[in-house]
């Protein structure tokens, strides 16, 4: 199979869940019940956070120094080097979710504080 086609299929399979979840939540953001609307808003914001995490992860892993962090001076991957890179990637995911939560809190306070 062509490498580009394989990369496209891999991208679609990794990102289908948050795209579908975000589209469904956005489509149904106008229900009558406030609880359902709140739940769908949370699902939409979470799918947005996942999308931003994916973008940040893509950008971070395309930077050349990531290979040096993973392999080190000797060009081989040992468990501590791999663990360090995985910790950084986890912090990217956590940081994006914290920022999205703070943005939601800020918008909520700005809209409803009198």
Image: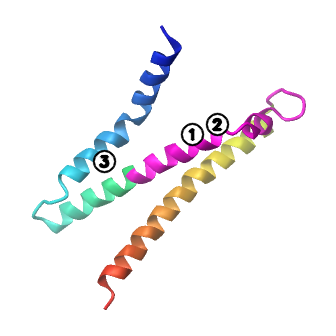
Q: In front here: 79 or 53?
A: 53
Displayed quadrant of residue 32: bottom left
| 39 left or right of 73 in image | left
Depth check, mark 2 against mark 3: the one in front is: 2
Q: In front here: 34 or 108?
A: 108
Q: Residue furthest bottom?
A: 114
Where does label 1 land, which residue? Answer: 58
Please, is residue 105 above or below residue 78 in the view? Answer: below
Q: Main secondary structure of the magenta part?
A: helix
User: Residue shown at 69%/39% (left/top)?
Assistant: 63
Q: In the rendering, at what x and y percent does residue 41 appear?
A: 28, 60
Element type at marker 2? loop
C-alpha distance separating marks 1 and 2: 6 Å
Looking at the figure, which quarter contains the C terminus? bottom left
Displayed quadrant of residue 75: top right
Reply yes or no: does residue 60 show up in magenta: yes
| 68 left or right of 110 in image | right
Instruction: Kindly indicate whether the residue at mark 2 contacts the one at mark 1 (C-beta within 8 angstroms).
Output: yes
Q: Which residues are magenta?
A: 48-77
Q: In the rendering, at what x and y percent does residue 105 appear?
A: 41, 73
Q: In the rendering, at what x and y percent does residue 51 appear?
A: 44, 46
Residue 22 disc label: 3
Element type at marker 1? helix
């Amino acid at each position: 199979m062509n490498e580009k086609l394989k990369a496209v299929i891999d991208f679609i399979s990794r990102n289908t869940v948050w795209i579908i979840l975000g589209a469904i939540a956005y489509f149904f953001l106008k229900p009558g019940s406030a609880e359902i609307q709140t739940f769908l808003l949370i699902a939409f914001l979470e799918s947005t956070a996942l999308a931003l995490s994916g973008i940040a992860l893509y950008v971070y892993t395309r930077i050349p120094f990531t290979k040096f962090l993973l392999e080190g001076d000797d060009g081989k991957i040992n468990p501590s080097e791999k663990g360090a890179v995985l910790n950084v990637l986890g912090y990217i995911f956590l940081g994006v979710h914290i920022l999205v939560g703070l943005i939601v809190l800020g918008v909520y306070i700005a809209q409803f504080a009198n």
